[in-house]
Image (cartoon, grey):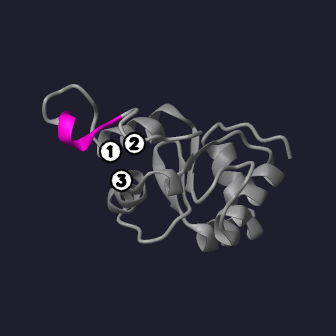
């Protein structure tokens, strides 16, 4: 998914009610999609090793997810860090809840906890 400045939100115009704030955009995305990954690059072309690892894990499990490339918009890149109070990217959200970054996702996957989380939340996985 490509995010272009001003397409979905504009901080300057949000006060006038003509566009949503970055916080509203992020909140809407994590609530409207079962699984959301804020990452560097896209699921088809990750642009950092950590984002690539999370993509590989999600693809291996076979869960559908929406990816947002934070490199295309500085407001999104900064906003997601404030939204989660987590300093690094990638960030994975499941059913509106922040799961964690690459290390947490990898550890959960290796322990079978990530797969259980998807099952418990009613998210279908192919693997």
Going from the N terminus, do you reach mark 1 or mark 3 first? 1
Q: Nearer the viewer, residue 105 or 41?
A: 41
Q: Residue 68 vs residue 54: left or right?
A: left
Gap between marks 2 and 1 measured at Cα: 10 Å
- Callout 2: few (<14), some (14-19), or many (20+) C-alpha neighbours within 10 Å? few
For the stretch drawn in magenta, the main secondary structure is helix
Q: Residue at x 70, y 71 (%)?
A: 49
- Do the numbered discs 2 and 1 sit on residues whose CB atoms are within 8 Å? no
10 in the magenta segment: yes
Mark 2 — residue?
Answer: 5
Q: Which residues are magenta?
A: 9-14
Gap between marks 3 and 2 measured at Cα: 8 Å
Mark 1 — residue?
Answer: 22
Q: Residue 15 vs residue 76: left or right?
A: left
Residue 63 position in % (x across, y down): 73, 43
Q: Nearer the viewer, residue 101 or 111?
A: 101
123 in the magenta segment: no
Q: Which mark is residue 122?
A: none
Q: Quadrant of residue 108?
A: bottom right
- Do the numbered discs 1 and 3 sit on residues whose CB atoms are within 8 Å? yes
Q: Which mark is residue 75?
A: 3
Quadrant (top left/top right/bottom left/bottom right) for the N terminus: top right
């Amino acid at each position: 998914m490509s995010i272009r400045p001003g397409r979905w939100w504009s901080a300057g115009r949000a006060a006038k009610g003509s566009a949503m704030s970055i916080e509203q955009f992020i909140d809407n995305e994590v609530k409207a999609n079962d699984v959301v990954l804020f990452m560097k690059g896209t699921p088809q072309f990750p642009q950092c090793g950590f984002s690539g690892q999370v993509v590989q894990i999600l693809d291996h499990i076979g869960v559908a997810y929406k990816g947002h490339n934070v490199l295309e918009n500085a407001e999104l890149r900064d906003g997601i860090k404030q939204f989660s109070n987590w300093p690094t990217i990638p960030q994975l959200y499941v059913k509106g809840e922040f799961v964690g970054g690459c290390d947490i996702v990898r550890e959960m996957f290796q322990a079978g906890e990530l797969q259980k989380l998807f099952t418990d939340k009613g998210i279908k996985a192919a693997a």
